[in-house]
């Protein structure tokens, strides 16, 4: 399968490397020092004490430089880069191109559908622990799971073919008939974790070891579930319990990408994670006092070091 990885970060880089190792024609879209390293040294994947090197790799700065339209685009750019990435992606989209979004948050599919046409867009969510540790080098944990589906809920030949390709690349792939619910089920755990970890500037272990910290996680999860249900998402009755159990079972040193971005004073996905809960809650009339307070704190922090632009 001809695959374009739009955003060669931790998730895109890991998935693209695995797909390339298993015979797919993969082109990575990257920039800066990361792109230079890919072109010069290839992609190094570290996982479980093992090192795999993919060399040479196809890597470009812009999708227009890729060879021909892609059959599959893995859309894995940071959410704050979505608008720019969509515009750049246009030349790589052919009539049969499927664009699988694996971005954080719950707004990606709607944004991509508006920019590319809903017929191209598949809804997806990834459960992986993977990050760029230096240019050209990605470190990943053993968990490699993707849930994907058509926006209509239909199990189509194209979604089955993509799932099979992912499985052949040693990625656990599940086809969902309600992919929006799958995205929200992840979001119910992700948004609280990103928010609490970023506010406390800590991995999860020290936060949940304090009773007030564990209670904060539970409150944030319950607020997110309430917003999702008010938004028409068919979350299961035990959604909050399952998300809380997942959070409490994470390794003590588990960090979140938004928390890392705060630590490194980089751009943050605050408005797409914490802010998405707050915005939707206001539109739907759902009270979210914990999210409201922490969003205000995190917005002040981000504006102070340039992690958000004024007016965003």
Image (tube, grey):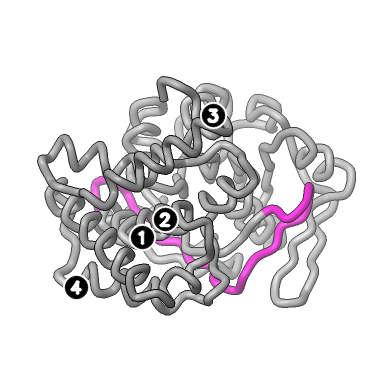
Q: Is residue 33 left or right of residue 226?
A: right
Question: Quadrant location of residue 69?
Answer: top right
Question: Quadrant location of residue 7?
Answer: top right
Q: Is label 2 or label 4 in front?
A: 4
Residue to which mark 2 is pinned: 125
Q: CA distance from mark 3 to mark 4?
A: 36 Å
Q: CA distance from mark 3 to mark 2?
A: 19 Å
Q: Which mark is residue 186?
A: 1
Label 1 Cα crowd, 10 Å radius (few <14 / some 14-19 / many 20+): some
Q: CA distance from mark 2 to mark 4?
A: 20 Å
212 w.r.t. 81: above or below: below
Q: Which mark is residue 238?
A: 4
| Residue 72 visible in image | no
Label 3 Cα crowd, 10 Å radius (few <14 / some 14-19 / many 20+): many
Pick the residue in front: 306 or 172: 306
Q: Is residue 50 left or right of residue 24?
A: right
Residue to which mark 3 is pinned: 85
């Amino acid at each position: 399968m001809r695959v374009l990885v739009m955003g060669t970060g931790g998730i895109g880089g890991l998935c693209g490397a695995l797909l390339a190792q298993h015979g797919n024609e993969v082109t990575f879209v990257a920039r800066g020092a990361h792109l230079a390293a890919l072109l010069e040294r290839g992609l190094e994947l570290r996982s479980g004490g093992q090192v795999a090197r993919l060399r040479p790799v196809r890597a470009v700065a812009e999708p227009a430089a890729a060879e021909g339209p892609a059959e599959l685009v893995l859309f894995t750019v940071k959410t704050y880069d979505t608008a720019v990435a969509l515009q750049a992606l246009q030349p790589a989209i052919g009539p049969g191109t499927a664009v699988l979004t694996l971005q954080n948050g719950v707004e990606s599919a709607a944004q991509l559908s508006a920019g590319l046409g809903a017929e191209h867009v598949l809804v997806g969510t990834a459960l992986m622990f993977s990050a760029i540790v230096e240019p050209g080098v990605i470190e990943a944990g053993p968990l490699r799971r993707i849930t994907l589906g058509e926006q209509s809920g239909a199990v189509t030949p194209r979604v089955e073919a993509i799932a099979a390709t992912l499985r052949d690349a040693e990625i656990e792939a599940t086809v969902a008939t309600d992919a929006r619910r799958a995205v929200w089920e992840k979001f119910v755990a992700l948004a609280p974790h990103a928010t609490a970890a970023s506010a406390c500037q800590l991995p999860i272990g020290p936060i949940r070891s304090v009773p007030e910290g564990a209670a904060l996680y539970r409150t944030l999860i319950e607020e997110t579930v309430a917003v999702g249900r008010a938004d028409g998402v068919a979350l299961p009755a035990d959604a909050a319990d399952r998300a809380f159990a997942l959070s409490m079972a994470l390794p003590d040193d588990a960090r979140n990408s938004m928390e890392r971005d705060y630590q490194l004073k980089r751009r943050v996905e605050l408005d797409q994670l914490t802010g998405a809960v707050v915005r939707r809650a206001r539109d739907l009339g759902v009270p979210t006092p914990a999210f409201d307070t922490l969003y205000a704190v995190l917005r002040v922090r981000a504006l102070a070091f340039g992690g958000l632009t004024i007016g965003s």
